[in-house]
Image: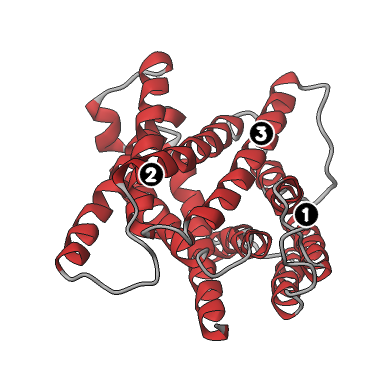
Amino acid sequence: MERKALRADLLMLIAAAIWGFAFVAQRVGMETMGPHFFNAIRFFIGALVLVPVVWFFSKKPIKSGKAETSTKKLLIAGSLAGILLFGGAAFQQVGIQYTTAGKAGFITGLYIFFVPLIGLFFGQRTGSGTWLGATMALVGLYLLSFSDGLSLNFANSLELKGDLLELVCAVFFAGHVLIIGFLAKKMDPIKLSIVQFFVAAVLSLLVAVSLELITWAMIAATAIPLLYAGVMSTGVAYTLQVVAQQHAHSSHAAIILSLEGAFALLGGWLLLDEQLPARGLLGCGLMLAGMLLSQLMPKIGFSRAKS
């Protein structure tokens, strides 16, 4: 069991790294197409990437402890996950147009706390080690994101709008982490990923058709960012999340996945020659310490609350 937990942590760490480095691709993509159209294409790509994987494993069945899930249940479960994924991605992409990148990253990272808070309403009790680890990670994320303090800009209505959209995004992503933690233990994670990607893609496309300009030239101009966001950030990283959360508590998973902020900073330093200040290094260290603390003290209060 310890080996499975360690493997899950590693997979989520890889997912966080992919999401962190995907930040550049998402920002570049916004220059040539609308946010909803961008999300629609990336989610369609993510679903298509997994189709041959499902076909391959269907030819070579692997024994597992899970009962075969009916198509109806898989579609319902994947649709619920897809709606939450669509909501989080949509509010994040739209919100970042109106607020600063640092503030958007920090507010989105509030799902570190929203996950255990929402979990309480469903009878999930989170241990003190995870709460402390989440606090350390959130402080670290703050140090990564800001150099001169955090405040909602009431004087700038557009920036305030962006801040509020990112806050809604954080709630959607918290719900997504929780539902994946529940569903991944009950059904095939790759099939679940395909369904959620397809649902998120269709919803994003419907909104894009209603609100945005859509041309083939946009897709061609955004090909490289779309391929990275679709294949790596969506197809690979989100599927790693689903696979890993079969063996991870949702609150603990949220802390590890939030390390995407640290990897985004590292990616900017490695790929874009951005400076890596001492404040940012301290933030990375606190986020890593929070992850380790939640791993070393995971069992206090992790059982379901008694009704």
Residue at the image point whose x is 85% and y is 46% from the top: 149
Answer yes or no: is residue 264 visible. yes
Q: Tell me residue 209's x, y (percent).
A: 35, 18
Q: Residue at label 2? A: 73
Please determine whether, in this image, residue 177 is positioned above or below residue 298: above
Looking at marks 1 and 2 on the same chain, the residue that comes earlier in the sequence is marked by 2
Say which element carries label 3: helix
Residue type at mark 1 is Tyr
Say which element carries label 1: helix
Q: Residue at label 1? A: 142
Cβ–Cβ under 8 Å for marks 3 and 2? no
Judging depth in this view, the residue of 121 and 25 nearest the camera is 121
Residue type at mark 3 is Val
In the rendered image, the residue lying farthest to the left is: 59
Q: Residue at label 3? A: 168
Please determine whether, in this image, residue 174 is positioned above or below residue 257: above
Answer yes or no: is residue 197 visible. no
Judging depth in this view, the residue of 48 and 288 nearest the camera is 48
Say which element carries label 2: helix
Looking at marks 3 and 2 on the same chain, the residue that comes earlier in the sequence is marked by 2
Residue type at mark 2 is Lys
